[in-house]
Image (cartoon, grey):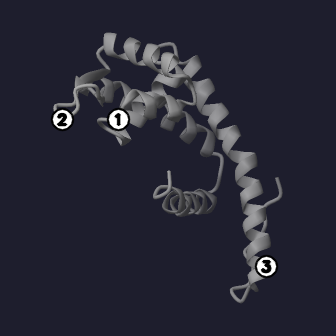
């Protein structure tokens, strides 16, 4: 992948649009590779008790405590039945707790348990270690640039996702 250099600070609106399109194309190219690496690391970890969808679900529950089955199914892009089966396995393992909403008895809230949070953090640490091992070949300036860029992307996407 070709890395473009920063345009002059006095870029025209058209130049900014072109640069934004190039950046979007680079994201579309790189993000799947990173996700593929993370999925492979989860699958290859002998001590992992979580599947990739279970890991994603725990991470979602950490960000969206008290969510419901429909929202989990939408997030995982699966049917409600598939999401329900995944949740049931996590409840049986003690990673997720289901509770009935006191105001709306038909509404079941899902929460990450302390045990679930510990497993999520252990998996994240393992993934961080593997990513860091891969990134150690880069010079410090590039690592700092990547970190800055990722923080900018987080600020762009976090409010809308």
Question: Which numbered marker is on residue 116?
Answer: none
Which residue is more in the foreground, 2 or 138? Answer: 2
Question: In the image shown, does 105 or 108 lie closer to the viewer?
Answer: 105
Dot 2: within a 10 Å radius of its alpha carbon, few (fewer than 14), some, or many (20 or more) residues? few
Which label's residue is closer to the chain start, 1 or 2? 1
Q: Position of residue 140 (x, y in %)?
A: 58, 58
Q: Most extreme residue toward the bottom, as rendered? A: 10
When the figure is inspected, residue 14 is found, relative to residue 144, above or below; the finding is: below
The Cα atoms of the two marked residues, 3 and 2, are separated by 53 Å
Return the residue found at the far right: 2
Residue 22 position in % (x across, y down): 78, 63
What residue lies at 49% left-to-right and 28% top-to-bottom?
73
Residue 43 found in image quarter = top right
Q: Position of residue 135 (x, y in %)?
A: 61, 45
Which secondary structure, mark 3? helix
Residue named by callout 3: 15
**Of tags 1 and 2, which is closer to the observer?**
2
Residue 121 in view: yes
133 and 30: which one is in front? Answer: 30
Q: What is the spatial separation of the Cα atoms under label 1 and label 3, in whole angstroms?
A: 42 Å
Residue under the point 63% across and 56% down? 139
Residue at figure coordinates x 32%, y 10% from the top left? 92
Q: Residues within 10 Å of mark 1 (few under 14, many from 20)?
A: some
For disc 2, the marked residue is 103
Seen in the picture, residue 78 relative to 93 is either above or below; the reply is below
Query: In the rendered view, does 63 fall on the left or right side of 86?
Result: left
Q: Which sits earlier in the primary sequence, circle 3 or circle 2?
A: 3
- Vertical position of residue 155 compared to residue 129: above or below: below
Q: Of label 1 and label 3, which has the lower sequence position?
A: 3
Task: Report which residue position mark 1 lands on.
Answer: 67
């Amino acid at each position: 992948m070709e890395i473009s250099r920063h345009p002059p600070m006095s870029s025209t609106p058209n130049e900014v649009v072109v640069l934004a399109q190039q950046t979007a194309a680079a994201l579309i190219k790189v993000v799947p590779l990173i996700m593929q690496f993370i999925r492979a690391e989860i699958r290859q970890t002998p001590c992992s008790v979580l599947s990739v969808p279970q890991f994603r679900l725990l991470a979602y529950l950490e960000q969206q405590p008290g969510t419901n089955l429909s929202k989990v199914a939408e997030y995982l892009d699966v049917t409600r039945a598939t999401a329900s089966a995944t949740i049931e396995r996590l409840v049986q393992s003690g990673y997720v707790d289901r509770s009935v909403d006191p105001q709306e008895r038909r509404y079941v809230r899902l929460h990450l348990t302390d045990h679930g949070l510990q497993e999520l953090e252990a998996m994240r640490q393992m993934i961080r270690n593997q990513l860091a091992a891969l990134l150690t070949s880069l010079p410090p300036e590039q690592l700092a640039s990547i970190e800055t860029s990722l923080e900018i992307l987080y600020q762009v996407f976090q409010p809308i996702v």
